[in-house]
Amino acid sequence: MKGIRELAAKIRGGVNIPHFKNTEESESVKMSAPSTVILPMQQHIGPACNPVVKAGDRVAVGQVVGDTDAFQSAPIHATVSGEVKAILPFLSEDSQVDAIYIQNDGKGTLYSEIKKPEVKNRYDFLRAVRQSGVVGAGGAGFPTHAKLTLKEGVEINTLVINGAECEPYITTDYREIMENYAHVLAGIECVMEYIEISNCIIGIEGNKPKAISLLADEIAARGIQNRVSVVELPAHYPYGAEKMLVLAVTGRTVPLGGLPCDVGVIVLNISTISALSRYLETGIPLIQKRITVAGGAIAKPQNVLVPIGTPIRDVVDFCGGYIQEPEKVIVGGPMMGVAQQDCEAPIVKQNNAILCLTAKENRFPQAQPCIRCGRCTQACPMNIMPVLIERHVDRNNAVMLNKLSVSGCMECGSCAYVCPAGRQLVQCMRQGKQIERKAARENA
């Protein structure tokens, strides 16, 4: 533990923020499937899937309804049984894709071809991981099979499991540990066996002592403590970020623009590894997500198991609706989540929370001119300078944005959180990345 704290002390930036983990002891409640699910074909980082069904088709739970030949993608499965009513354009966060609308017949009929995958070697394992449809559950949505497929010459000796869950309000990973620790550990052992990784470290922030104790006891009971360990991280945002987590638990520095595999590490979210274990045991793909529903405007804050494709409005209604009109509804955490224009959008694979915030909870200062205090630079865990990036975004200067490493920003929001002038720095970073990408395309 001393070694971990010494490493953690070397990590720069980040912020101390309130945790608001009020739903941490709220055992997950399963929600009934809605009358209609909406399944966008973009639920992962990478090329969107193409519909493999058409309007009028009958589908069953777990049946593939969207897929593509692209490597960095993951198939999308029906989460209810019923009829495909329509395939319509759908506006996701940054692009327009198709979405499949399935009318629920209320029967919950499981697809007849679902069966436990037969896994004998690494090839079988990776194929099963892709068929599961599992993507990164922490919010990024990186296809899990792509992360586990190693390029020639790449050697991985450490699997890091991200259980930090450092965003305020969200308690889905904590509940995954408390309710499904056996799947967490079984998934870890499978990945270590088939990807041939000798060591695993599970990183959990210290504000979750029950989870740390439970996993440590179960690891000892399985006799795998010489290969799998749990480490307690300081409760400091954003320790859940891959590069910060890797440095904190291994002492290895992932280079700017690099990946954990560059330093012999693979990082998986704790809910991702558990979902993978369930698929290997049952053959049922990823068709539901645990969602923390919280915030001062919601009547019954709780953790809910939600069929993927369920409209946000249905989840809110399941939790008793609003006790007052929310100032803002955010999907994800308050630091990195996405504010919603309405609640008609569906829950997708990457989602882990719906926050219904009151005006008091959503209080941010009105944007004022930058006072050049430098707090944003001090708070940045990636050691980049938001104050200078903002200046060159205003000037549309792609060359300087590249020199200032705008692409290295992970959009954690620490800079905006500490800014006394209320500058919209995260939006500025996103705009800077767009300017840089556009320039790269034009110069290609």
Image (cartoon, helix red, strand yellow):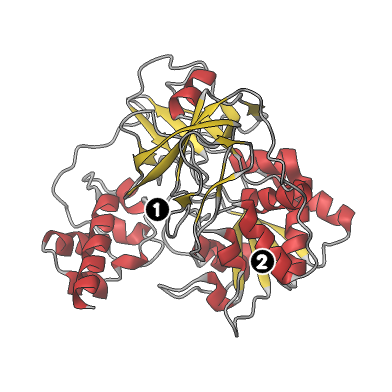
Cα–Cα gap, marks 1 and 2: 23 Å
Query: Dot 1: within a 10 Å radius of its alpha carbon, few (fewer than 14), some, or many (20 or more) residues?
Result: many
Nearer to the camera, 183 or 425: 183
Q: Is residue 205 visible?
A: no
Q: Position of residue 113 (x, y in %)?
A: 71, 46
Considering the numbered disc 2 on the image, is that residue within a helix, a strand or a loop?
strand
Q: Is residue 349 above or below residue 55?
A: below
Mark 2 residue type: Leu
Q: Position of residue 427 (x, y in %)?
A: 26, 50
Quadrant of the drawing holding the N terminus: bottom right
Mark 1 in CB contact with mark 2 (< 8 angstroms)? no
- Horizontal arrangement in the rendering, residue 277 relative to residue 356 (left or right): right
**Residue located farthest toward the front when viewing the structure as drawn:** 56
Q: Which residue is mark 1?
A: 412
The C terminus, quarter of image: bottom left
Question: In the picture, residue 318 is in which quadrant?
Answer: top right
- Identify the mark at residue 159; answer none if there is no mark: 2
